[in-house]
Image (spheres, rainbow, N blue to C red):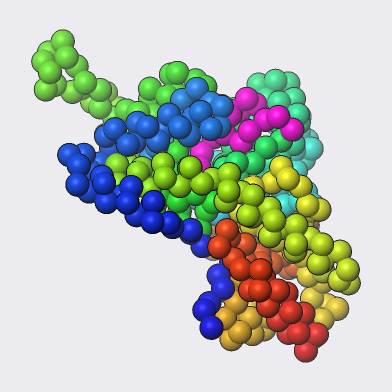
Amino acid sequence: MNNIPYGKQTISQEDIDAVVEVLKSDFLTTGPKAKEFEEKIAKYCGAKYCVCVSNGTAALHLSSMVLLKENDKVLTTPNSFLATANAILYVNAKPIFVDICSDGNIDLDLCEEQLKKDSSIKAIYAVHFSGKSVNQEKLKYLKEKYNILILEDCAHSIGAVYKDIKAGSCINSDISIFSFHPVKTLTTGEGGAITTNNKEYYEKLLRLRNHGTTPNPEIGPWHYDMNELGFNYRLTDISCALGLSQLNKLDIFLEKRRQIAKKYDDFFQNILNIESLYSFTNESAYHLYVIKIDFKKFKVDKKELFLKLRENNIFIQYHYIPINKQPYYKNLGYGDEHTPIMEDYYEKALSLPIFPALLEEDQEYVLKTLLEILNG
Ligand SMILES: *Cc1c(COP(=O)(O)O)cnc(C)c1O
């Protein structure tokens, strides 16, 4: 039997053909496909500008260079992949970890408490965890009332909506970032993107992606000036061709993920001591489908469940280990924040397999096996 991972890319013959076509062309790295990919992402999200970069972490790094200065304080969530908070450290700014709400997203009411207490807080880095947007009205309110910068980490949420607001549109934020890692909804192998409606940010991001350089045709057509320190965070045209081809299928991918999520949701309505992280919503992009298991009521613990599922070819994951509890963060003095919801959440949360190619029979097998193991 094949392994069933929690997430996986879907690659078609068209994707392969699109990549091969670039390999036969003149441009392998950032060229016409990158430009087209950026235009299409910006259009899809409803943002003015898009800059594609080598991965989601690079997108976070460059965004932090644009938004933050040394020692700036940034409210963020412990419930994310490491990169969200690490990007704050990259520019020597200071993450402040805020507890989450019941849906796994940063608690914006607690953010407001912090903003009231400390007017020097510069920004919020919010993650639309699992593909469900944070409350956009509250985001808008905080941005306007406290005059803060907002970064939306949309690594889980391409295609997600909040009422009529599309993830990455930056309607209530300064910058959004995406990841196109194979486990995410849309893939370029490795890849990432930044969207913004701010022209200055856009131009600076373009420079930073390319060593901090700008052409200077006044001196000569060959000449470039470097006025700031940048990186090589370019995305290849090979990757962008894959991304463009994947974008054509994004709405089908999302539809499939929502179908799978709905089925999980219906199933867990009738199961005691296991609940879906939030009840089904068409607005979520469902990068993850998370359930919360009250392990005290069952015969196995978290580790046994993980290992036994593996023995049965099911590769679930626990998202996320609280970032503030990581040894590196503990060495910096983090880890003792008051985050009871996050701690309770991490004891219970499990990400089930969800990806467009997941077969109905495999989903049923996952559910049956999960209950069998839990009930011993
Ligand atoms: C995947 C992910 C990232 C990092 O993206 P990479 O492309 O792997 O560098 C950042 N934030 C979140 C929430 C992610 O899930």
Vertical position of residue 159 compared to residue 308: above or below: above
Vertical position of residue 208 compared to residue 340: above or below: above
Task: Give the position of the C terminus as an image quadrant.
Answer: bottom right
| Residue plotted at (51% across, 46% down) | 249
Q: Does the magenta stretch include residue 323?
A: no
Q: Nearer the viewer, residue 295 or 281?
A: 281
Vertical position of residue 90 compared to residue 183: above or below: above
Vertical position of residue 111 compared to residue 339: above or below: above
Q: Nearer the viewer, residue 121 or 221?
A: 221
x, y percentage for residue 371? 77, 80
Disc tally is: 0
Q: In which quarter of the image is residue 174?
A: top right
x, y percentage for residue 336? 68, 56
| Residue plotted at (17% across, 39% down) | 26
x, y percentage for residue 290? 70, 61
**Which residue is situated farthest in the top direction here?**
218
In the figure, is residue 317 to the left or right of 42? right
Q: Which of 8 and 346 is in front in this view?
A: 8
Q: Using the rendered image of the protein, determine whether residue 142 is visible from the camera's viewpoint.
A: no
Q: Is residue 175 magenta?
A: yes
Q: Which of 257 and 96 is in front in this view?
A: 257
Range drawn in magenta: 163-179
| Residue plotted at (40% across, 36% down) | 37
